[in-house]
Structure formats: structure tokens, C-alpha cells
Amino acid sequence: MKGYKHWVSVTMSFLLAATVSACATGQSVQGETAAAYPTRQIEYIVPYSAGGGVDLVARATADYLSKEWGQPIVVVNKAGGGGAVGAEFALKQAKNDGYTALAVNVSNTTMLAAGMKNPPIQNEDQIYTARIGKGTLAFAVKADAPWQDFAAFSQWVKENPEELTWTSVGPAGFSAFGVAQWLDAIGADFSKTRMIVTKGASDSVPKVAGSHAVLAVHTVGEIMPMLAAGKVKILAVAGEERSPFLPDVPTAQEQGIDGLTVFWWTGVSFAKGTPDAVIQKWEEGIAKMTSDPAYLQKLGEIQVEPAYADRQQFTQDTEKETGAYTELATKKGIRK
């Protein structure tokens, strides 16, 4: 019996020592892995077609961080469902190991949640890691349209809402929220206006230039090519300040129309459960990137303004924005 007890005691001591050793080793390996991340290729999912604002920002980001971290970051376009298809892949289908990042933006997050009672992707499905940049909302009409300023145009719309046709990728798209907020601000009847469904800015702005729609509401960058060609004119931009890319175009607020706060933004998010060390590395990497003059120059070339927000601020902003857009969508009948 004494021998048995001695054997048990020795065995238990050995197992305890092994367990402690394993835990210590595990912690060490885990720490080394976190410090070394990334150790292989990362897929950066863009839930839209190539060439758009989200895609261009993602490619500039991937290029910067690939060089910074010494590992390839490959942009993969997975378009469809207004950004939901790619988001679902990155947040619900891929492994949450930090090697699948999502190029998240306002359309497939706060606006999606506001426009649908049961959206396929919700704020709770992701970790908002860092916001990168923003785009100013602009109101464009045909170059030879009779209105010379936004105030006169808004008055015409208020008196003739049934004559206003405007473009959007859908009833809960970025343009729809911009139009809804503007019409609410001027007291015009949103329900009497008519939306013309398009595939995006590359389809929408030419429709305005060709007199197939009266108004296009997109970011400055998306309208810029047709503006430079003299096919359309921008009557106003939203926000409290003029766009640095269109310093001669007054804000809506300057023209007596307050409350236009809708703006475009893009950033990075990861699936729930992604290691915190990965989130922190991306957060810090993007903070450094958005203060780098060379990267800022790239953003400027596509008319995107830097708008860095860390994980905490980014999360708070999206939650607040979701509430505001849900209220607007419910009020205007957008929420389905």
C-alpha cells in the first residue's frame, strides 16, 4: 500500500509539473505567435466590385501593411447583396483567426441594419477594429440644369416632390439615406419622389448627365470624373465644412439647410472571437498608416479624407449611427 501511495504521489507530482510546464509553454508560444503575427498571407475581403471607393482604400491599405508587416495581404472582391455577401463570408464563414479581414463601410453596416428588420449582418457579428477614411456627400444635377444653388433646388423639390427622380442602388442604399435626410430637413414629401435603381455611381451619375434622373447623391470622389468632364454640377455638399477637394462648393448648411450629417466611411473589422492581439496589431498599424504622408497622398488622389478612429471610438460611432439611421428609415418607410 505504501508503494502504491508513493507511486500515486509521484505520478500526481509529475502530472502537475507537466501541466504547469505545458501552460507556461503554451503561454510562451501564444505570446510569440501574437508578436509574430502575421506569419502567412491575409485575405482582405472587399464586399464590392473592384474600382469603387471601398476597394481603392482597401488596396492602398493592403499595400501599406504588407510592406509594414512583411507578409502579403491580398484583396479579394466578393460583391453582391449590397455588400452583405462578402461580409457574411468574412464574418461568418471564414475562420476567426485573424487571417480574414473585412473592408467594412457604412452601407453594409449601419445602413444595412437600419434598412432591414432582419439584416444578414449586424454590429454584434463583428469587431470594429479601426476606421480609415471618409467621403463627403455631394448633390449633383445635370450641368445645364436650371438651378444655380442648392437652396433654390430644395425649394423647387419642396413644391414639386413628384418631379424629383433620384438614383440609388436600392431603398436602403447610401444615396437613399442621403436623400431621405435632406428631404426631411426641408420638409418635402419623400414618398412622392421616385427612386431610380442603379448599379452604383458609375451607372447613376451618367443617368443624371443624360437626363434620365434629376439628382445623384454620392461621395465627391464618385462624382468627380463626370464633374471634371463638365457633364454634371454639384450644388452642395453635406457636413459642417466644405470638402477639401471642392473648396468652392458651399455646404448645404451655408445655404440655409441644416442637419445633413450622412457621410461615407470605410474601415476594417473582424469576426467575433478573433484574438485580441490581432485586433490590436491592426488598430495600431492603421493608426500609423493614417498619419503617413505617402498614404495620405494616396487617399487624396481618390478624394477620400483620413478619418482614423480606434476600436472603442469606431464601435461607439457605429452604434450611435445605427440608432440615428434606424429612426430615419422607420420615419421614411425605408425599413423593411
Image (cartoon, rainbow, N blue to C red):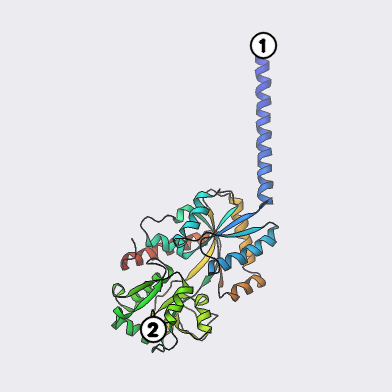
Left or right of 187 on screen, residue 103: right
Q: Specify the quadrant that holds the C terminus.
A: bottom left
The residue located at (68%, 43%) in the rendering is 29
Q: Is residue 225 visible?
A: yes
Question: What type is the residue that disc 1 sits on?
Answer: Lys
Q: Amino acid at mark 2?
A: Gly
C-alpha distance separating marks 1 and 2: 94 Å
Q: Position of residue 331 (x, y in %)?
A: 31, 67
Q: Give the image location of residue 261, x and y in percent.
A: 43, 73
Do callouts 1 and 2 mark residues in contact (Cβ within 8 Å)? no
In the depicted view, which residue is nearer to us: 81 or 262?
Answer: 81
Does 99 appear above or below 211? above
Tag shown at residue 92: none
108 up-or-down from 91: above or below: below
Q: Which residue is mark 1?
A: 2
Rendered location of residue 45, percent (x, y): 55, 58
Along the line of sight, which residue is nearer the eye, 161 or 77?
Answer: 77
Element type where label 1 sits in the image: helix
Q: Residue at x 67, y 21 (%)?
A: 11
Judge whether residue 238 can be spotted in this image: no
For label 2, the crowd category at 10 Å Cα-Cα, with few meaning under 14, some 14 to 19 and many 20 or more, is few
Label 1 CA crowd tier, 10 Å (few <14, some 14–19, many 20+): few
Q: Earlier in the sequence, mark 1 or mark 2?
A: 1
Q: Quadrant of the N terminus?
A: top right
The image shows residue 313 at horizontal and vertical percentages of 52, 62
Depth order, front residue of 214/119: 214
Q: Which mark is on residue 256?
A: 2
